[in-house]
């Protein structure tokens, strides 16, 4: 079966079983390895992507549910040459430790820091990050970075 979806702004036709986890399609077929299949149980958030702008665990999302939708991965939300606001703030706040959780963190933070999505308070940002686990426990700096992005946005 061929399923069409948009990934990072590009239409893609994927020939795969409809129940193939989206994270496997992204990594194995499209070679977008930012999303990490760490727990595969919807618990850790390392596989987070945006589906129609909503943070979504790609390990529990069958390919067929992404049909006709707009998927954004960390690769589409970051840039090596010109860091995006979330990316730059995380670097400025020394928030990155081992980095395993960060692709998912960047995805969720991109959503949270978009105007109107989250109140600019520590409590609200922490609540918004409930689906992203950082085993290095660097949460305070991650929250600092998110709040800085919210303060700087127009
Ligand atoms: S790998 Fe998907 S939530 Fe952990
Ligand atoms: S930085 Fe290591 S798991 Fe988050």
Image (spheres, rainbow, N blue to C red):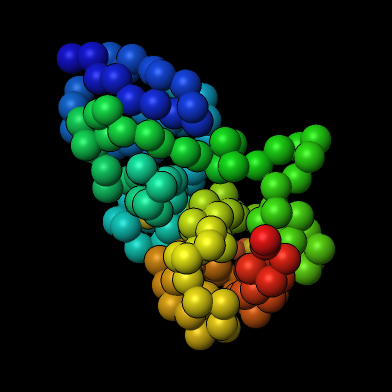
Q: Is residue 154 left or right of residue 113?
A: right
Q: Is residue 122 visible?
A: yes
Residue in front for this viewpoint, 39 or 13: 13
Nearer the observer, 32 or 115: 115
Q: Quadrant of residue 95?
A: bottom right
| Foreground of the two, 117 or 72 | 117
Horizontal side of 60 relative to 109 (left or right) equals left
Residue at 55% in and 67% down = 134
Kindly indicate the quadrant of the structure image that contains residue 61. Answer: top left
Q: In the figure, 66 relative to 43: above or below?
A: above
Quadrant (top left/top right/bottom left/bottom right) for the N terminus:
top left
Q: Is residue 82 left or right of residue 36?
A: right
Q: Which residue lies at the image location 65% right of the left edge and 42% below the top edge?
A: 78
Q: How many marks?
A: 0
Judge whether residue 145 can be spotted in this image: no
- Residue 117 sits above or below residue 5 on the image: below
> What residue do we see at 37% from left, 52% from top?
54
Q: Position of residue 122 (x, y in %)?
A: 57, 83
Q: Residue visible at 23% across and 14% down?
A: 2
Residue 65 spot, x, y in % from top left: 21, 37
Q: Does residue 94 sit above or below 137 in this rendering?
A: above
Residue 132, position as x, y percentages in the image = 46, 64
């Amino acid at each position: 079966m061929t399923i069409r979806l948009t990934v990072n702004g590009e239409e893609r036709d994927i020939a795969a079983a409809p129940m193939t986890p989206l994270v496997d399609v992204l990594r194995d077929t499209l070679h977008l390895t930012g999303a990490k299949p760490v727990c595969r149980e919807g618990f850790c958030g390392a596989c987070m992507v945006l589906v129609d702008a909503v943070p979504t665990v790609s390990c529990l999302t069958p390919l067929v549910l992404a049909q006709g939708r707009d998927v954004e991965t960390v690769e589409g939300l970051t840039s090596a040459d010109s860091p995006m606001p979330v990316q730059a703030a995380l670097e400025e706040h020394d928030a990155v430790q081992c980095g395993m959780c960060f692709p998912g963190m960047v995805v969720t933070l991109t959503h949270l820091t978009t105007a109107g999505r989250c109140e600019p308070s520590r409590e609200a940002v922490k609540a918004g990050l409930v689906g992203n686990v950082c085993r290095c426990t660097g949460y305070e700096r991650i929250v600092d970075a998110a709040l800085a992005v919210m303060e700087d946005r127009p």
